[in-house]
Image: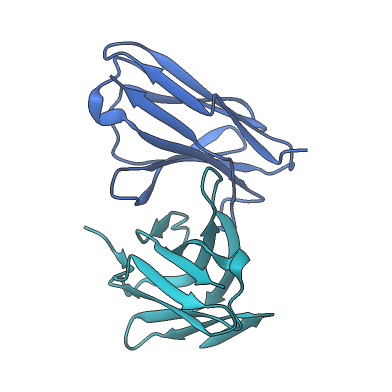
Amino acid sequence: DQQVKQNSPSLSVQEGRISILNCDYTNSMFDYFLWYKKYPAEGPTFLISISSIKDKNEDGRFTVFLNKSAKHLSLHIVPSQPGDSAVYFCAARGSFNDYKLSFGAGTTVTVRA
Amino acid sequence: DTAVSQTPKYLVTQMGNDKSIKCEQNLGHDTMYWYKQDSKKFLKIMFSYNNKELIINETVPNRFSPKSPDKAHLNLHINSLELGDSAVYFCASSPQAANTEAFFGQGTRLTVV
C-alpha cells in the first residue's frame, strides 16, 4: 500500500534543459513533503521541502510545486547539470505527531552532456 | 568527519545467522532511525528512537531488534537471518523527532545466502 508514488522510474535530459520529476500521494493527511537525492553507494541527502500551506518553494536551481487538490507535487531542476544525475526520492509526512516519512520508489535522472 | 556512519558497509552471511549493524551520529541529534530499502527500491522506516526511547516501531519481524545505548548510537540486531532480509539498511538521524529533514548514513548492503 504505497502512499507515495513516483510513476516515472527514469528520466533522461540534456544538460542545460529543465528536469521535471513528478510525485503523487494518496494520504490527504500528509502535510509536509520532501525531496531527497541519492548517489550510488551513498545515503539519500535532503534536497528541498515544502509545507502544505505553500504551493511553491524555490532554492537555487531547484523548485518544488505542490498541488494539494490533485495530491501532486513536482520538482523542477533548471538548468540541469551533469552532477544532478542521481536518484531522486519524493517523501511525505503526516501531521499531529506522525513522524514517519513515506517514500516513493525514486526516479533516476540522467543528465546528458 | 562523517555525520552518520554505519558499519559494516557490506555484509554477506548465511541463513540462520545472527548479525548486527552499527550506527553512530556525531551531529548531536536527538532522533535516530533505521530504514530498509527493498528490491523494489522503496525506503521504509523500521524503527525510530528519540533520546534513547523507541517512538516508531513498524511492523517488522521480531527477529529485528534495535538498541540505543545512548542518543548518538542506534544499532540493529537481526536474529535468524532469512533470504528475504537481503536489502540495503540505512541509518539516519534528525535534530528532533518532528524534524524530518534527516541525515542518512551510506547504507549497509546485507546479502543473505
Q: Residue furthest top?
A: B17
Q: Nearer the viewer, residue A110 or A9?
A: A110
Q: Residue furthest left?
A: A1
Image coordinates of residue A96 in percent, x first then y, are 46, 64
Q: Is residue B54 left or right of residue A48?
A: left
On screen, residue A8 above or below A105: below
Q: Nearer the viewer, residue B32 or A108?
A: A108
Question: Is residue A92 something that shows in the picture?
Answer: no
On screen, residue A27 above or below B65: below
Colour of chain B in the rendered structure image: blue
Q: Quadrant of the C terminus of chain B?
A: top left
- Residue at x 56% of width, y 43% of height: B92
Image coordinates of residue B76 in percent, x first then y, are 47, 26
Question: Is residue A57 something that shows in the picture?
Answer: yes
Chain letter for the cyan colouring in the rendering? A
Image coordinates of residue B3 in percent, x first then y, are 71, 41
Q: Quadrant of the N terminus of chain B?
A: top right
Q: Nearer the viewer, residue A71 or B68?
A: A71
Count the numbered circles shown. Answer: 0
Residue A78: quarter of image: bottom right
